[in-house]
Image (tube, rainbow, N blue to C red):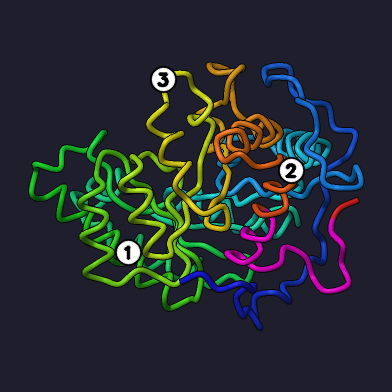
Amino acid sequence: MNAAGPPDLPDRDRAGQQGAEPARADAPLPERYPPLPEPLLVRGGELADVVDDHTHLDSLADHEVDALLAAAARVGVARAVQVGTDVASSRWTVRAVERWPQLLGAVAIHPNEAPRLAQRGGLDAALTEIAELARHPRVRAVGESGMDAYRTDLTDPAALRAQRESFAAHVAIAKETGTALQIHDRDAHDHVLDVLAAEGAPERTVFHCFSGDAALARRCAEEGWYLSFAGTVTFKNAQVLRDALAVVPPGQLQVETDAPFLTPAPHRGRPNASHLVPHTVRAMADVLGLDTQELALILTRTAEHLYGPWYDLGDPGPT
């Protein structure tokens, strides 16, 4: 499905921002992070408004979040989706989206966490809490959930069952709440496709940090799903990813950091953050044969279609 306009979010786009504290524009960037790249601009020389589709800020102190959000805004990446991976980080996500208007949230149990919780008898309770957190008006995605055969041995029937049941539950939560689904798929493409076929994908389904080949990318695009590319697409040894990117209609693309991981070239090996998104956008534009300004506008429109508005009507957001 490739609807042109933003989703209907009558109750979710009125979330109050009373007490929200915008990131300080003068907050210094911590020294461990790479420097700011050239800003992303749109026609007329204005700063772009690209969204970091997937980031993890929950390990940082508040003043560091302030600094990273301010740095990102200075280069045309003014908004982000903060993603939880367990109950604790999902609770933090809800607090974060109440504090920082630049953030919307995603909540979930990571697929590698699901077997551990199941073994302790805690998976059902965790999923129940995720379902409650997903009803917060500024939580606009369920994720990251999916399947992972890289860090979990899916030849173990118990582990496979836990991941599949957890993923299916997240699909159901996304449908019930009318939110997008952010999928984690690592070395588990067939498993992910099997669950989506069995459960039915939500209307707005995003493959976070897409890691498949051109054939999988084409399949996802044909299904109307969205593919988010991270800094990995800039790596010299990632031609398979660039080939996959090349077959996706631009309107079904997103860009992300997966920060603090997957830092794009030329800063691979250092901590990642939203202010480095311009490196990835420029690499994507080169692959697609698009002007960077044009791609920035497309990415922004698609993010707003997927997640709805960030700010209240009449509230332009942080200044």
Query: Is 235 situated left or right of 197 in this image?
Result: right
Nearest to the observer: residue 300 or residue 14: 300
Crowd around label 1: few <14 · some 14–19 · many ≥20 (10 Å): few
* Residue at the disc numbered 2: 77
Q: Label 3 sits on what residue type?
A: Asn
Q: Nearer the viewer, residue 150 or 248?
A: 248
Amino acid type at image mark 1: Ala
Snapshot quadrant of residue 316: bottom right
Which residue: 56% across, 26% down? Answer: 263
Instruction: Name the mark nearer the viewer: 3 or 1.
Output: 3
Q: Residues within 10 Å of mark 3 (few under 14, many from 20)?
A: few
Dot 3 or dot 1: first in sequence order is 1
Kindly give the residue lying farthest to the bottom in the view shown.
10
> Helix or strand or loop: what does disc 2 sit on?
loop
Disc nearer the start of the sequence (3/2): 2
Which residue shows up at 67% across the image and 37% down it?
A: 274
Residue 205 vertical placement versus 44 (above, below): below
Q: Is residue 229 left or right of residue 223?
A: right
Determine which quarter of the picture holds residue 315.
bottom right
- As measured in the structure, the alpha-carbon distance from the residue carrying label 3 to the one carrying label 2 is 26 Å
Q: Does the stretch in magenta take in 20?
A: no
Q: On residue 125, which mark appears?
A: 1
The residue range painted magenta reads 300-317
- On the image, which quarter does residue 125 sit in? bottom left
Give the farthest residue toward the front: 289
Q: Against 269, is 140 above or below?
A: below
Instruction: Give the residue displayed 64% in from the left and 56% down from the top.
Output: 95
- Residue pointed to by mark 3: 237
Q: How many marks?
A: 3
Q: Residue at x 61, y 52 (%)?
A: 81
